[in-house]
Amino acid sequence: MTSTEAPALARTIPPSEFDIGTPVEWMVDPDHRARILGVTYEFSQTGERKTVWYTPNKRRAKKALILSELNQA
Protein backbone atom coordinates (compact mmCIF):
# COMPACT_ATOMS: atom_id res chain seq x y z
CA MET A 1 0.00 0.00 0.00
CA THR A 2 1.35 3.44 -0.85
CA SER A 3 0.74 6.76 0.81
CA THR A 4 -0.33 9.71 -1.32
CA GLU A 5 0.15 12.28 1.47
CA ALA A 6 3.94 12.69 1.14
CA PRO A 7 6.43 11.81 -1.60
CA ALA A 8 8.38 8.62 -0.94
CA LEU A 9 11.74 10.39 -1.15
CA ALA A 10 10.92 13.59 0.74
CA ARG A 11 14.00 15.51 1.84
CA THR A 12 14.68 15.69 5.54
CA ILE A 13 17.49 18.25 5.19
CA PRO A 14 17.08 21.29 2.93
CA PRO A 15 19.83 21.58 0.24
CA SER A 16 21.07 24.83 1.79
CA GLU A 17 21.97 22.95 4.98
CA PHE A 18 24.31 20.39 3.38
CA ASP A 19 27.80 20.94 4.74
CA ILE A 20 30.34 19.33 2.44
CA GLY A 21 33.90 19.30 3.73
CA THR A 22 36.71 20.94 1.80
CA PRO A 23 40.16 19.28 1.92
CA VAL A 24 42.63 21.52 3.79
CA GLU A 25 45.51 19.17 4.68
CA TRP A 26 46.94 16.01 3.15
CA MET A 27 49.02 13.44 5.00
CA VAL A 28 51.42 11.73 2.63
CA ASP A 29 53.95 8.95 3.03
CA PRO A 30 57.36 10.65 3.54
CA ASP A 31 59.12 7.90 1.56
CA HIS A 32 56.60 7.72 -1.32
CA ARG A 33 55.07 11.18 -1.67
CA ALA A 34 52.57 10.05 -4.30
CA ARG A 35 50.85 7.90 -1.65
CA ILE A 36 48.19 9.80 0.29
CA LEU A 37 47.66 8.37 3.77
CA GLY A 38 44.90 10.71 4.92
CA VAL A 39 43.02 13.95 4.30
CA THR A 40 41.70 16.56 6.73
CA TYR A 41 38.40 18.13 5.69
CA GLU A 42 37.04 21.42 7.04
CA PHE A 43 33.28 22.00 7.08
CA SER A 44 32.24 25.53 6.13
CA GLN A 45 29.11 25.87 8.26
CA THR A 46 30.46 24.45 11.52
CA GLY A 47 34.20 25.10 11.12
CA GLU A 48 34.79 21.54 12.34
CA ARG A 49 37.74 19.57 10.95
CA LYS A 50 37.72 15.81 10.43
CA THR A 51 40.60 13.62 9.32
CA VAL A 52 39.95 10.54 7.22
CA TRP A 53 42.76 8.00 7.11
CA TYR A 54 43.23 5.83 4.04
CA THR A 55 45.60 3.40 5.76
CA PRO A 56 44.78 -0.34 5.79
CA ASN A 57 43.56 -0.20 9.42
CA LYS A 58 41.89 3.26 9.02
CA ARG A 59 44.05 4.63 11.86
CA ARG A 60 46.60 7.41 12.13
CA ALA A 61 49.81 6.65 10.26
CA LYS A 62 52.99 6.31 12.36
CA LYS A 63 54.93 8.56 9.97
CA ALA A 64 53.30 11.13 7.74
CA LEU A 65 54.27 14.39 6.10
CA ILE A 66 51.51 17.00 6.48
CA LEU A 67 50.94 19.30 3.48
CA SER A 68 48.58 22.25 3.22
CA GLU A 69 48.93 22.34 -0.59
CA LEU A 70 48.92 19.31 -2.81
CA ASN A 71 50.78 19.92 -6.07
CA GLN A 72 50.55 17.28 -8.77
CA ALA A 73 53.74 16.96 -10.79
Image: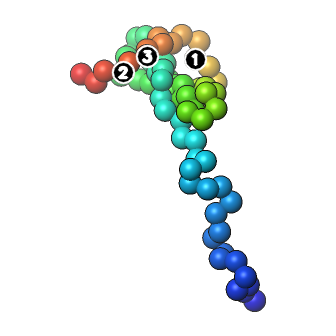
* Depth order, front residue of 26/41: 41
The N terminus: image quadrant: bottom right
Looking at the image, is mark 1 or mark 3 earlier in the sequence? 1
Kindly tell me whether residue 54 is visible in this rendering: no
Q: In this view, does 21 lie above or below 65?
A: below
Mark 2 or mark 1, earlier in chain: 1
Q: Residue at x 55, y 28 (%)?
A: 42
The residue lying at 61 percent from left, 48 percent from top is 17
Q: How far apart are marks 2 and 3 (CA)?
A: 7 Å
Q: Comparing marks 1 and 3, which lies closer to the viewer?
A: 3
Mark count: 3
Tell me the residue that label 2 is attached to.
70
- Say which quarter of the image contains residue 59: top right
Position of residue 41 measured from the top left corner of the image (x, y, whole percent): 54, 29
Q: Distance between the residues labelled 2 and 1?
A: 18 Å
Residue drawn 48% across and 23% down?
24
Q: Residues within 10 Å of mark 2 (few under 14, many from 20)?
A: few
Give, as a three-letter code, the residue at label 3. Answer: Ser
Label drawn at residue 61: 1
Residue reaching furthest to the front? 16
Dot 1: what SS?
loop
Q: How far apart are marks 1 and 3 (CA)?
A: 17 Å
Q: Which of marks 2 and 1 is in front?
A: 2
From the image, tell me which residue sits under label 3.
Answer: 68
Q: In the figure, is residue 71 to the left or right of 26?
A: left
| Left or right position of 5 against 54 | right
- Looking at the rendered structure, the kind of residue marked 1 is Ala
